[in-house]
Image (cartoon, rainbow, N blue to C red):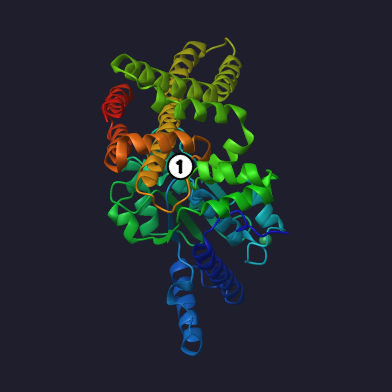
Amino acid sequence: MPDVFADLVGQDEAVDTLRRAAASAAAVLRAAAVAPTTDAAGDEFDALAEEAEGAGAGAAVDPGAGMTHAWIFTGPPGSGRSVAARAFAAALQCAYGTGCGQCPGCHTTMAGTHADVRLVVPEGLSIGVNEMRALVLRAASTPSGGRWQVVVIEDADRLTEAAGNALLKAIEEPPPRTVFLLCAPSTHPDDISVTIRSRCRVVPLRQPAAEAVAEVLARRDGVAPDVAQWAAAAAQGHVGRARRLARDPEARTRREAVLAVPRRLTGVGAAFDAASALIEAAEAEAAASVAETDATERAALETALGAGGTGRGAAGAIRGAAGQLKDLEKRQKSRATRAQRDALDRALVDLAGFYRDALTMALRAPVASVHTDTAALAGAGAQKWDAEGALRRLEAVLECRAAIEANVKPRIAVEAMMLALWKG
Ligand SMILES: [Zn+2]
């Protein structure tokens, strides 16, 4: 049976680091069990560091092999930041300290039901201060399972400044037995504050090779090997995206529509039409992805509010209800915006892959195509545009992504890109 790190594709170095840290963490717990008076995490980690150094005197033990209470997992989207954080959380809760994948600690953490593992997945564009304060407060409590309180924050780059400060306070004065695992694209100050960064150990993940992604799709998800290979290449190292392409016909249809853009750009009018189509497709995809959750949440809230009755205080309850519904609508709108941006970004990454293929063909570079199914079209582009023309188009797509990231209105950025792609 595979252990908890099995799904971390193509990240051998990071897995080594995490395994060693989990073993060190288990040693901390064993030491604490022998000497129960030691209750400060700092003392435990210091004792551990000494232990590691002692071992290092004889064998070549990495001094960074030990455990620490705050970690940042960085890497490009789809490289497995949150997979790594969850696996490490499981290894910390593992009865054997190894992330065996079999014991209740491993099982419940991977299933998301462990009482001492809290997972923050921001649904909107940012993680607010109230959410963070509540989290930090709960994380300070004694772990009910006797091991660690683990807080996993996916997309820590979406922390508001105030939320970041609340988190920083907790990381600076860590409660005993609390471990923070943050996920972010990079340690650039735009993604994570310098002060938080300075308190954390960084685990960099790389973009996994297509072969490694194809292997895991075939082994874990039972995808046919040829489909797995095609999906892994088309997803450009994004494991989740590769799985969706392999298994979801709608995702394949949307991708084909995006890759049809280059041959449709026959004039100014066509460029604007293509921009509209791309934006509307992203909106439709996003709407479909959040519709069900929105409806369920609203129904649940209305039921809860409807149970309030008509007795004394009902007027106040109704005023409160209006406020709660408004809050919910605000949250849902923020989540929908996020989903639209994500969908549009996926389309732009696919499109960038097409022009990258044209560029590598024009340069006769010995690298595999991203989109094997549009290789002929990319080859025709390479002949027509040469390397410079293909590069200019690739840059136009990347500039569009950067503009949207910098809060330019998506429609304006996409229209500018389509015109640039048409003009070359
Ligand atoms: Zn286990």
Looking at this rendering, what residue extends furthest in the bottom direction? 58
Q: Which residue is at the front of the view, 168 or 321?
A: 168
Image position of 86 (left or right of 332) = right
Where does the N terminus fall, quadrant-wise? Answer: bottom right
Q: Hey, what amino acid is under mark 1?
A: Ala
Q: Quadrant of ligand 1?
A: bottom right
Q: Which residue is at the front of the view, 339 or 213?
A: 213
Q: Where residue 334 appears, x then y in whole percent?
A: 41, 27
Q: SS for tag 1? A: helix
Q: Where residue 146 appears, x then y in whole percent?
A: 62, 61
Q: Which residue is at the front of the view, 222 or 21?
A: 222
Q: Quadrant of residue 311?
A: top right
Instruction: Inspect this view and state whether residue 405 appears.
Output: no
Q: Where residue 73 appears, x then y in whole percent?
A: 44, 55
Image position of 334 (left or right of 400) = right
Which residue is disc 1 drawn over? Answer: 134
Image position of 119 (left or right of 351) = right
Q: Quadrant of residue 310?
A: top right
Instruction: Inspect this view and state whether residue 136 appears.
Output: yes
Q: Is residue 98 above or below residue 75?
A: below
Residue sitting at 37 percent across and 16 percent down? Answer: 273
Q: Which residue is at the front of the view, 282 or 227?
A: 227
